Amino acid sequence: MQSVHIDDSPMKKVDDVTGVILAGGRSSRMGRDKATLEVAGTPLFERVLDVLQDFFAAVLIAGDRPDLARPTVPHHPDIYPGSALGGLYTGLLKARTEWIFAAPCDMPHPDPELIRVLLEHREGHQVVVPHTSAGFEPLFALYHKDCLKPMRAMLEEGHYRIYDFYDQMSVRYVSEAELPPGWKQSLINVNTPEEYSKIRKKT
């Protein structure tokens, strides 16, 4: 009988994209640090970090969070503090790769399959972002270093709505039909005590 070889080797990590965890927010609506809130016994930051470290060879933290940093996961205080756009800009500027994949630090269920789907669509574009019936998901998306110039211009003007620079870029909008099953749960993040309570009850 012919033997069957099962490849159980670890997945090759993506080395031309840096995973960036956005952790510069003030958690004002939550009233306490969102990154350290636990779901199923694991802090939200750790849940995001585990997924990004499994996927990307390099991961960094955008935000002044030395408490979350590791020897192989540095933190970088936001150059323009106070907005998610500033976090994206910092992560993109500090990354050694041409691309970053950004994710907020407060996602209970980040899905590697969703990341894989987004990565498949970056050829020929400068931004890859989910676009669902709820709108854009600019904080769980891919950005090329070409975005730095328009990002900086917006930040210098005090203009922080991330997708307002998209019309200057080649953007690949990934529709609901192209996203993997379970994408709605994957894109949930935690902003308020009420949301956190609901997620804990479901998990």
Image (cartoon, rainbow, N blue to C red):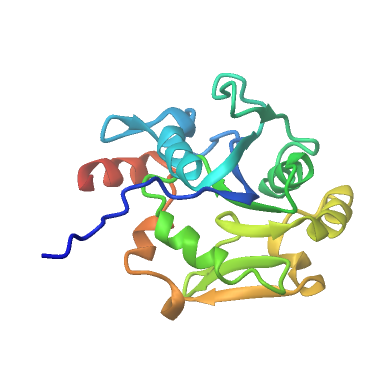
Q: Residue furthest left?
A: 1
User: Where residue 198 appears, x then y in whole percent?
Assistant: 28, 46
Instruction: Give the quadrant of the N terminus.
Output: bottom left
User: Where residue 203 appears, x then y in whole percent?
Assistant: 23, 44
Residue 106 visible from this viewpoint: no
Does 174 sit left or right of 6 as displayed? right
* Residue 140 figure quarter: bottom right
Please tell me which residue is depicted at 75% across the width and 66% down the height of the picture. 164
Please tell me which residue is depicted at 78% across the width and 71% down the height of the picture. 169
83 relative to 65, above or below: below
Residue 2 visible from this viewpoint: yes
* Residue 123 figure quarter: bottom right
User: Where residue 15 appears, x then y in whole percent?
Assistant: 62, 48
* Residue 99 figure quarter: bottom right
Does 136 sit left or right of 7 as displayed? right
Picture mark count: 0
Q: Nearer the viewer, residue 164 or 195?
A: 164
Does 150 sit left or right of 37 as displayed? right
102 relative to 46, above or below: below
